[in-house]
Structure formats: structure tokens, C-alpha cells
Image: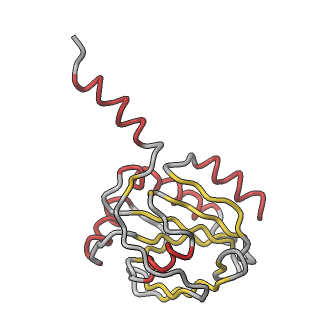
Amino acid sequence: MIKPISFLLPLFSLALFFGCGDNIDKPLVSNQNIVLKTTNNKTIILKKTEDGFSYDNKSLLLAFFTTSCIPCDAQIPNLNNLQSRYQNDLNIISAVLDNSSLEDAQDFISKNGVDFSVSTDKNNLRLSATLGNITSVPYIVIYDKDGAYVTDYTGAIPEEMIEADLKRIF
């Protein structure tokens, strides 16, 4: 007889490699700079470039999450490690794409030990629309320091894979 737990463990493991889908209302696409407020009340201005965004003369990794997504939780330690290792060359900014309150987002940050900027701003949806209306999370997109598009990923991605792409642009 198969034990229920032995059946569920492989399914859960497989789920980490796929994104969580959400019904997210999509606003109109904008070709302008996008201003985001972080959960610690910092203002971030993402400057629109020809094919992406730039911020603070560093490479930029935008990570789109929801606070109820298990693969998103699994991605946090990888992003924390990358932010720590490449803090002089990389900004990681997470945009929460659900209707989480500031308190929900702060609980998510605390629970997962997030070490990078997180925004619950309404402009997160504008940013998503500019990138083609993100429908699955986690979703990560990387830009070089000049704001040129490098690559993107959907689902939980191994840290080494992200790091290999980052090393190409540093």
C-alpha cells in the first residue's frame, strides 16, 4: 500500500519547478519610468530604457512574486545569496503581484528572511503590463547596468543558473 505522504512528496517537489498562476488584473502598458514604493517606504524609480529598465547604475533583477506562492518562497534564499554576493553590482527588487496589504508583505518578508527591496505598490501591475502582463510567478527578469534586457525565467530557478547569467554581464 502506498503511503499518502510518499505520494505527495514528489508532487510537492515537482511544484517547485513551476510557477503559480494568478488571475491578475492587467492595466495598460506604459513606456515611461515607473515609481515604486518599497515596504520600508523607500522610493525606487525604474528608468525605462529602449528594451528594459535601469536603476542606480547597477544590473537589475526584478522578481515578481505573490505572498501565497510556494515556489516564490523557495526562490528567496537564492535571491538573498545573490544580493549578498553581488551587492556592488546588482539591485534585486521584488514586485508583489497580488492584493497583499503592507502588513501581509511585511509578514512574508519576515517569514522568508528577505534581504532585498520589496514593493506592494499599485505600480507593480503597471510594471507587469510593461513586461507583457506576467501571469505566472515567480517570474524573474534581468537587465544589465545600462537597462538592456539580458534574460528572464518563470518558476523557481536554481541559483547557479541565475548566477551564470549575471556573471556574463558584470
Which quadrant does the C terminus fall into?
bottom right
- Count every numbered label the image shows and give the total: 0
44 versus 23 height, above or below? below
- In this view, the residue in front, 88 or 75, is 75
Horizontal side, residue 91 vs residue 111: left or right = right
Residue 95 appears left or right of 152: left
158 sits left or right of 103 in the view:
right
Residue at image position (60%, 64%) is: 141
The relative height of residue 30 versus residue 92 in the rendered view (above or below) is below
Question: Is residue 67 found left or right of 147 in the rendered image?
Answer: left
Q: Residue 92's spot in the image, x, y percent?
A: 56, 69
88 lies above or below 40: above
Examine the rendered structure and indicate whether residue 168 appears above or below residue 103: above
Q: Which quadrant is home to the N terminus? A: top left
Image x and y of residue 25, in percent:
37, 72
Q: Nearest the camera: 84 or 152? A: 152
Q: Residue at x 35, y 33 (%)?
A: 11
Q: Residue 31, how many percent across, how many down? A: 61, 85
